[in-house]
Amino acid sequence: MISRKLIALLIVVGMPATLMIWYRVHQSSGFAPLELIVYPLLFGGLSIVAILLLQRFYLKQPLSEFNRGTGTLLTDGLWGVALTAVYFLLFVLERPLLGGILESRPNMELLGLMLDMRQHPWMLVIWFGPVLWIGVALYEELVRTFLLNKLWSFSPAMAWVVASVVLSALIIGLTHWSQGPYGVVTIGIKSLVAGMFYYRVQRLLPLVLAHVLYDGIQVALLLLTYPE
């Protein structure tokens, strides 16, 4: 079983790593706006299916592992809102503390897509709907919780729990290397918070909801305030 877990971990870690390598190679030829909607949804959706298949049929473990903690839709929602507030607090603190030290690489193609969506309402519906919920939030949080659950299964010791959170945060941070050192570090910090939060509540939905709210609010503000 240990060898199966290690193989499954390598597969799941390889998913975002492969996406980043592919993105870097493809970036030189540019993306069409529609591609920046279709690709995340397609890759994220297929990766979700792959993770669930690994969990259920390769490792022969229940899907309920992602939601071992007790909770309801209401408590999950409240936890998600609270976690979103923590993310934005970190965002406010990180700007003055790290913005002048670490290089940031804005994704101009993604910015162009966001601005183009103002002229195409159907893009807004797709992006704020299935792309954000499935292709971004659910995909990334399922990767995070899969990694943490499998790592934690090797030992219940608190030192290993913390080390696993740090390792998963490092992995997730590095998969955002295209955003520059600032993106890697700040996403890594939020991943530390998310990992310890998941250890506390053992519920997937609050992580997904917080991810959706954090990204969605930032994009909505961008669309509302960026000059025409």
Image (spheres, rainbow, N blue to C red):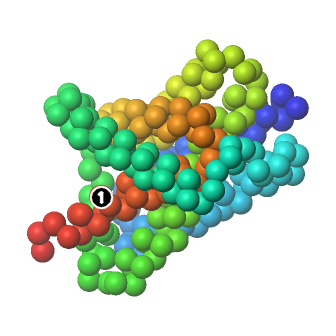
- Quarter of the image for residue 90 reads top left
* Residue at horizontal 16 percent and vertical 66 percent from the top: 226
Front-most of 174 and 149? 149
- The structure residue drawn at horizontal position 87% and vertical position 51%, both measured from the top left corner, is 57
Identify the residue at horizontal 68%, vertical 43% (top origin).
69
- In this picture, residue 36 sits left or right of residue 98: right
Give residue 186's position: percent from left, percent from top: 35, 36
Q: Nearer the viewer, residue 157 or 97?
A: 157
Q: Residues within 10 Å of mark 1 (few under 14, many from 20)?
A: few
Name the amino acid, label 1: Gln
Query: Would you identify the image quadrant in which residue 49 lies?
Result: bottom right
Residue 98 drawn at (x, y percent): 23, 30
- Residue 224 horizontal/vertical position (percent): 20, 70
Is residue 22 or residue 109 the one in the foreground?
A: 109
Of the 4 image quadrants, the one containing the N terminus is top right
Q: Check the image and report above or below for 102 versus 175.
A: above
Q: Which residue is mark 1?
A: 218
